[in-house]
Image (cartoon, helix red, strand yellow):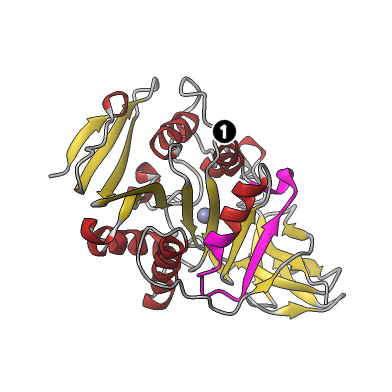
């Protein structure tokens, strides 16, 4: 049985070793927050680094990679402290709830910390921030959700102090993904990442894996990328791997359905589509076409909703995930 520690009493052992605890916090709704946290304290001094996953509970490859980090990184090999959170949204994970929190139907990535008296997800964001905000570096492992087919890439928040930007960028360089995507517009960066930057935490979020199937290949990309990042900042010995990557610089675009129906995609993740190309059709239950969707510009398909069930009415708090169809990014060359 793991040890439960109330958030308010959280303190890490300063001696080298591994601690595994469940951090708990009572939300005013009566619901409890529980976050599993492993802390590996190295035998030599150094910075603090967080690897976290399971913010969106059906994105499993990052979760398995985080477990692997807990099992394989040894205090004797480590300079500084490694915090690993295998599953952030445990409440959603255990219910197999996709993307949104089952208590308040909010999306954690877009919650700003600092309001523990707000809804459950706001309290969760605040609790998570309290655990990780002393870190110098942070990797947040994501994937395509259970209903999404996704092409692997790493978005990088490029806002705030130049030094933090540079450190964030360097965290991405060890991932064996076709593309990395520096983002310079704060409006395109989730609120939780912006809060991290404001606290001086260099951070990236990594998108590898899809459709609720954690393959060894995807788990390995998450794991190897995190190890490379720990080497990059000097917390582990060895030269970091530097797989070939290309830059994504174009405008992102998401197609959404305005009517509920059955989505029949005409593309797959990683496809490059040309202007006018058919992306998919939305039909009624009988297969009658309601709407066709076409590409406007030459773009890369980052992901599409591989579950045909599209619910146009389900937009809790204005969040348009359940009526999403295709996510693209414009290609410049
Ligand atoms: Zn995610």
Is label 1 within 8 A of ligand 1 (CB to nearest ligand atom)? no
179 magenta-colored: yes
Give the image location of residue 297, x and y in percent: 85, 70
- Name the residue: 68% across, 46% down: 159
| Quadrant position of residue 124 | top left
- Name the residue: 30% across, 44% down: 37
Question: Which of the pair 202/26 is nearer the observer?
Answer: 202
Disc 1 is placed on an element classified as: loop
Give the image location of residue 101, x and y in percent: 46, 41
Magenta part of the chain:
170-189
Question: Which of the pair 291/63 is nearer the observer?
Answer: 63
- Name the residue: 38% across, 53% down: 96
Give the image location of residue 313, x and y in percent: 65, 45
Q: Can you name the residue that lies furthest to the left here?
A: 1
Q: Which quadrant would the C terminus be assigned to in this image?
A: bottom right
Q: Is residue 117 left or right of residue 204?
A: left
182 magenta-colored: yes
- Name the residue: 47% across, 63% down: 232
Q: Is residue 4 left or right of residue 69?
A: left
| Quadrant position of residue 219 | bottom left
Neighbours of disc 1 within 10 Å: few (<14), some (14-19), many (20+): many
Residue at the disc numbered 1:
112
Q: Is residue 43 above or below residue 6?
A: below
Question: Which of the pair 129/322 is nearer the observer?
Answer: 129
């Amino acid at each position: 049985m793991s040890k439960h520690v109330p958030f308010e009493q959280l303190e890490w052992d300063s001696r080298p070793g591994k601690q595994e605890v469940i951090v708990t916090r009572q939300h005013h709704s009566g619901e409890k927050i529980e976050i599993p946290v492993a802390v590996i304290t190295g035998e030599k001094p150094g910075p603090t680094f967080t690897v976290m996953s399971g913010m969106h509970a059906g994105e499993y490859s990052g979760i398995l990679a985080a477990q692997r980090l807990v099992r394989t990184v040894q205090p004797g090999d480590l300079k500084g402290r490694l915090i690993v959170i295998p599953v952030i949204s445990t409440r959603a994970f255990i219910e197999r709830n996709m993307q949104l929190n089952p208590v308040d139907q909010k999306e954690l990535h877009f919650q700003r910390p600092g309001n523990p008296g707000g809804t459950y997800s706001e309290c969760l964001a605040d609790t998570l921030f309290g655990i990780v905000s002393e870190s110098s570096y942070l990797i947040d492992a994501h994937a395509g959700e259970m209903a999404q087919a996704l092409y692997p890439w790493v978005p990088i928040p490029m806002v705030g102090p130049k030094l933090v930007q540079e450190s964030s960028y360097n965290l991405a360089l060890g991932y064996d993904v076709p593309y990395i995507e520096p983002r310079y517009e704060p409006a395109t960066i989730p609120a939780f990442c912006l809060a991290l930057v404001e606290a001086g935490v260099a951070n990236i979020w990594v998108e590898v894996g899809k459709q609720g199937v954690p393959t060894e290949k995807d788990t390995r990309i998450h794991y190897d990328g995190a190890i490379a990042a720990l080497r990059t900042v000097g917390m582990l010995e060895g030269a970091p791997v530097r797989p070939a990557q290309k830059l994504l610089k174009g405008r992102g675009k998401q197609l959404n359905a305005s009517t509920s129906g059955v989505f029949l995609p005409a593309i797959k993740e990683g496809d490059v589509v040309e202007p006018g190309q058919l992306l998919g059709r939305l039909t009624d239950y009988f297969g009658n076409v309601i709407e066709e969707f076409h590409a406007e510009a030459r773009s890369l398909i980052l992901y599409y909703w591989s579950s045909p069930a599209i619910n146009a009415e389900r937009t809790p708090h204005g969040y348009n995930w359940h009526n999403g169809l295709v996510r693209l990014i414009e290609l410049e060359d």
